[in-house]
Amino acid sequence: MKLYYHPLSGHAHRARLFLSLLGIETELVEVDLAARAHKSPEFLKLNPFGQVPVLDDDGTIIADSNAILVYLAKKTAAKDWLPEDPKGAAAVQRWLSIAAGEIAYGPCAARLVTVFGAGFNADEVIARAYLILQHIETALDGRPWIAADQPTIADVALYSYIARAPEGNVDRGAYANISAWLKRVEALPGFVAFQKTEIGIPEAA
Ligand SMILES: N[C@@H](CCC(=O)N[C@@H](CS)C(=O)NCC(=O)O)C(=O)O
C-alpha cells in the first residue's frame, strides 16, 4: 500500500502507525506541505480536501485518517481492532468522533499554533486540550485501553496528538492514566514513533 503523509502530521501518523501495527508493507510518499503540494491539482484528485493522509491500496483511494483506520481493520478482518458487535463498534466510534472533534480542536490545534504557526487563540485551544485530556484520564481509570479490553483503532486514533501534546504547550504531567496508556501503545509490536520536534514544553516523565 502507499501512504501519502507528512512526518509532522498526527493525522498521518495515525494511519502510518496502524499500517505498521498490522505489519502491512507500505510505501511512504511525503507530501511537501510547505510547498503546498497538498493543494496541487494531482493531489486534489486524490483528496479534494487537500489534506494528508491519503491511502492508495492498489488504486483504491481512501482519504481521512479515521476512514483509513476503518478501511484497514475491515480489509484485514482485524476484528479485535474494530469489534463488530453493536456495543463494541459504538464504543470505538465514540472515540473516533472525539479524535476528529475534541482532539482536533484541542491538543492538535494547540500544536498547530506552535509547530505550524496557525492563528488560533492559544489559551483557548490549550484549555480545550486540558478538558479532553481530563475526560480521557477519567475514562482510562482502571482500564488499559480506551474502548475495549484490547487495543482498538480508537487507541490508535487518539495516540498521536496526545503523545505530542507538550509540543503545543499542553502539560501531560497530571495525567497518570494517560502516561501509562501512552506507554502501552508504544509497547505494541510494530509501534512506530511520531516524529518529535524541539518545540513546546518538555514531555512529562
Ligand atoms: N479529517 C482529516 C484531517 C486531516 C488534516 O487535517 N490533515 C492536515 C495535516 S495534520 C492537513 O493536511 N492540513 C492541510 C490543510 O488542511 O490544508 C483526517 O482525519 O485525515
Image (spheres, grey):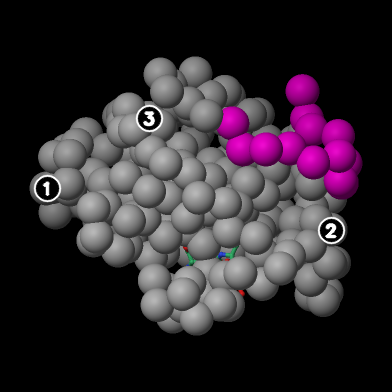
Q: Earlier in the sequence, mark 1 or mark 3?
A: 3
Q: Amino acid at mark 2?
A: Thr
- Picture residue at 32% right of the left edge, 56% below the top: 56
Residue 114 vertical position relative to residue 77 in the rendered view, above or below: below
Q: Is residue 132 visible?
A: no
Segment colored magenta: 193-205
Q: Looking at the figure, which quarter contains the C terminus? A: top right
Distance, label 2 to label 1, CA atoms, is 41 Å
Crowd tier of the residue under label 3, counting other residues whose Cα lies within 10 Å: few below 14, some 14–19, many 20 or above: some
Looking at the image, the residue that sits furthest to the front is 42
Q: Looking at the figure, which quarter contains the N terminus? A: top left
Q: Position of residue 11 (x, y in %)?
A: 53, 55
Q: Earlier in the sequence, mark 3 or mark 2?
A: 3
Residue that carries the numbered disc 2 in the rendered image: 114
99 relative position to 137: left or right:
left
Residue 195 vertical position relative to residue 49 in the rendered view, above or below: above
- Picture residue at 37% right of the left edge, 30% below the top: 21
Q: Are marks 1 and 3 in contact (CB under 8 Å)?
A: no
Distance, label 1 to label 3, CA atoms, is 22 Å
Crowd tier of the residue under label 1, counting other residues whose Cα lies within 10 Å: few below 14, some 14–19, many 20 or above: few
Image quadrant where residue 125 sits: bottom right
Q: Which mark is residue 21?
A: 3
Distance, label 3 to label 2, CA atoms, is 29 Å
